[in-house]
Amino acid sequence: MTRILGIDPGSRKTGYGLIDVERSNARYVASGVIRIPDAPLPERLKLIFDAVSQIAQQYQPQQMAIENVFMSKSAGSALKLGQARGAAIVAATNADLPVSEYEARKVKQAVVGNGAADKLQVQHMVKTLLKLPASPQEDAADALAVALCHMHTMQTLIQASTGSRARFRRGRLSVT
């Protein structure tokens, strides 16, 4: 079993979601939103670092997946988002977690089947895929979607690797 921590970073609200993965099955563990009070940016970044560190310590994930920064209309917003991501990534690496990064379009494609899906579609599919009684909060749903995207990516890589070796073995066997 592998536990994955998904992070949807933000300088005001950072979503987190944890899933356990066994074979091709995902099971919901926990999710929530780290709400950052109005404070100078360095203090907000420390709060993100501390919260992600605490989540990693409490839930003991083996891997972390985080959404990449998208270029927004405001360069200042993109920079703050990048700094929030950095605080979460440093917390993960401080806990010895490998970190994978995914574009928002890839996350939506993996979970909804449409890279241009809206937030309601993501929430609905996260609820459905994880068999939750209700849709998680928007930022928590996005974080769970990042974790699910990572699960699908890892499974695809494993299948491709196994499939290549299996073909190679069959090829060798037929030659012998």
Image (spheres, helix red, strand yellow):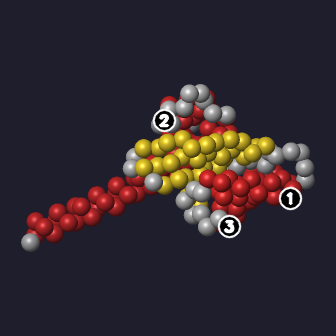
Residue 43 horizontal/vertical position (percent): 87, 56
Total marks in image? 3
Three-letter code, disc 3: Asn
- Count neighbours of disc 3 (C-alpha within 10 A) and say few if under 14, some if 14 to 19, many if 20 or more: few
Q: Is residue 40 above or below residue 90?
A: above
- Expressed as whole percent of the image width and height from the top left, the position of residue 79 reads 77, 55
What distance separates the C-alpha of mark 2 from that of mark 3? 31 Å
Q: Earlier in the sequence, mark 2 or mark 3?
A: 3
Residue wearing tag 2: 129
Rounded to the nearest angstrom, the CA distance separating label 1 from label 3 is 18 Å
First reached walking from the N terminus: tag 2 or tag 1: 1
* Type of amino acid under label 1: Pro
Is disc 2 in contact with disc 1, using a CB cutoff of under 8 Å? no
Q: Do the residues under discs 2 and 3 have CB atoms within 8 angstroms?
A: no
Query: Does residue 37 appear in the picture of this structure?
Result: yes
The structure residue drawn at horizontal position 54% and vertical position 41%, both measured from the top left corner, is 28
Which residue is rendered at x = 28% and y = 62% of the image?
Answer: 164
Which mark is drawn over residue 42? 1
Residue shown at 54% from the left, 32% from the top: 132
- x, y (%) of residue 93? 65, 66
The quadrant the C terminus occupies is: bottom left
Residue 94: quadrant of the picture: bottom right
Residue type indicated by callout 2: Leu
Q: Residues within 10 Å of mark 1 (few under 14, many from 20)?
A: few
- Left or right position of 130 against 5: left
Residue topped by disc 3? 94
Q: Look at discs 1 and 3 and give the one toward the viewer.
A: 3
Question: On the picture, is 164 further left or further right than 71?
Answer: left
